[in-house]
Amino acid sequence: MANKILAVLEQREGTIKKVSFEVASTAAKLSKELNLDVEAVVAGAEVSNINEVSKYGISKLVHFKNSELNNYSSSAYADVFSGYASEVGATYIFVGNTAFGNDLAPRLSVKLNSGCVVDCINLTVESGEVIATRPIYAGKSNLKTKLNSDVKIFTIRPNIFKAELSDAGSFSVDVKEVSNPNLKSKVVAYKKSEGKLDVAEADIIVSGGRGMKGPENFNLLESLADVLGAAVGASRAVVDAGWRPHREQVGQTGKTVSPTLYVACGISGAIQHLAGMSTSKYIVAINKDKDAPIFSVADYGIAGDLFEVLPVLTEEIKKIKS
Amino acid sequence: MKIAVCVSHVPDTATRIKIGADRKAIDPAGVTYIINPYDEFAVEEALKTKEKVGGDSLVYVITVGGEANKDTIRKALAMGVDEGILLKDDNQRDSFGIAKALADEIKSLGCEIVFCGKQSVDYDNSITGQIVAEMLNYNCVPVVVDFKIDGNKITAEREIEGGKEVVETELPAVITTQKGLNEPRYASLKGIMAAKKKTITEKPAIPSTNFAEVLDMNLPATKQPGRILGSDSSAVAELVKLLREEAKVI
């Protein structure tokens, strides 16, 4: 049986997510270096953008179909994907490090008796083996690791690996109807949070700390986030004070993020916060205290009063966007 | 009902990480260890579940590691957990190795519900709970911010990107806990005194071979500080220009 690489894709409400194209592209690239075949797999009911996967070096996709699989079910998905992995002799499985991937990957690991490295930020092939780098201690340190199991599972951090266009020549979709999925655990509802983007997925984050002085002032950040198409983030101090919900917290005991642009407003830069955001591509800091640690990681800083600076910044950006 | 809480003993989040001489782990010198912050939510939810279920329910706290982990066990006992169990192993285990030891103990105790933090803030693996569940063939809901139990039926809300999933499942189950689920209680003086009299059972963790091999641990390249452009809104024009032309991010 041929050894294979599986790229596990994630769909939500029938649409394959952006991180899954990063997974597909990464798996396709590694398949060349490892000299293995690669296939993408997805479970769901109707999936609207399935053909888009072909742009990322994937020539075959298997769609496990059942209306009950539209919503995620850890038990059903784990059974379907582990069954298929065994059937085709998959030796590598890649999936995005999202709530979905993080739930699914360890379950597949147990079923396939394989090791699992989560939240990879770099994957290389050295002497025929995949070497993974992942942040630990919320990014204060990096760990280089490899797996010594027959089957190896890696989850990749969103926004790090590029979804590179690559023509695989052909593309086929194999639809497999799933009968009687195992729905021991199932998602019965999805509650979208009000507010817009999630910090874990956003390309730009505008974040506020204690310097915002109160929850009522976050409208300044929301206006800036609106014009930038950004998510609003928060420091632990303001989450603990109840000014902002925990889902917005960036840093250790919150979310570790790597957006293209991170704008820190009134955040001094505690070690736990810096750990969670210092891998952002560009960092802007606005803070009254010019000695605040946040300036040590910022590309551009304004050491001034955010209440005076933010409205002007929002206006300026609005001008260039219009 | 028997309830298990799995906890880990981790460096305080304020720790500045220094790499050990072998470059495989941190240098523990001068590091303060605490109960993993996410595990405090697990302890609290286990105690709340005991209070709700009532009867002769018992809560066990289980941890895998060295002698020092007893401090974390005592912390949980002081909060109100009934008994502590240390599965001893001084060697570093991967998530599988830890899960294997925990699952073995949970099985022999006969715990129907297991709470653990959604991840440990040292290795940030966030998969141990799910692995324990699969090994035991238990249901599992990770990253839970709302938990209800009614007889055998569990309804839990888990945090996902951009919202929450409402998951329905049944006992036996593993729940991994996220900040926001509850407000962990403080250990009272009475609790701390009572904890001294509670049992901590110590036994060797069942052997396990790691799948994951650590090759190297290193510190990320430190970012070079950039430029302070000014001290008021007169710097905004330059900032916008740099973001547009140099960083090309807007």
Image (cartoon, rainbow, N blue to C red):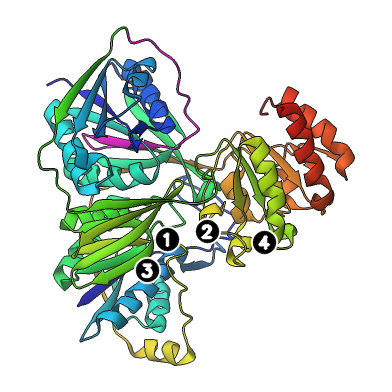
Task: Read off the residue under disc 2.
Answer: A246
- First reached walking from the N terminus: tag 2 or tag 4: 4
Q: Residue at x 34, y 64 (%)?
A: B116
Give the Cα separation between the discs numbered 1 and 3: 8 Å
Q: Which residues are magenta?
A: A147-168
Q: Secondary structure at mark 1?
A: loop
* Residue A259 left/right relative to B199: right
- Mark 3 chain: B
Q: Residues within 10 Å of mark 4 (few under 14, many from 20)?
A: some
**Circle number at residue A215:** 4
Dot 4 and dot 1 residues touching (CB under 8 Å)? no
Q: Residue at x 48, y 51 (%)?
A: A193
Q: Secondary structure at mark 3?
A: helix
Question: Is residue A165 one of those drawn in magenta?
Answer: yes
In the rendering, at what x and y percent does residue A105 appear?
Answer: 29, 42
**Circle number at residue B178:** 1
Q: Residue at x 40, y 42 (%)?
A: A98
In the rendering, at what x and y percent does residue A285 appear?
Answer: 74, 44
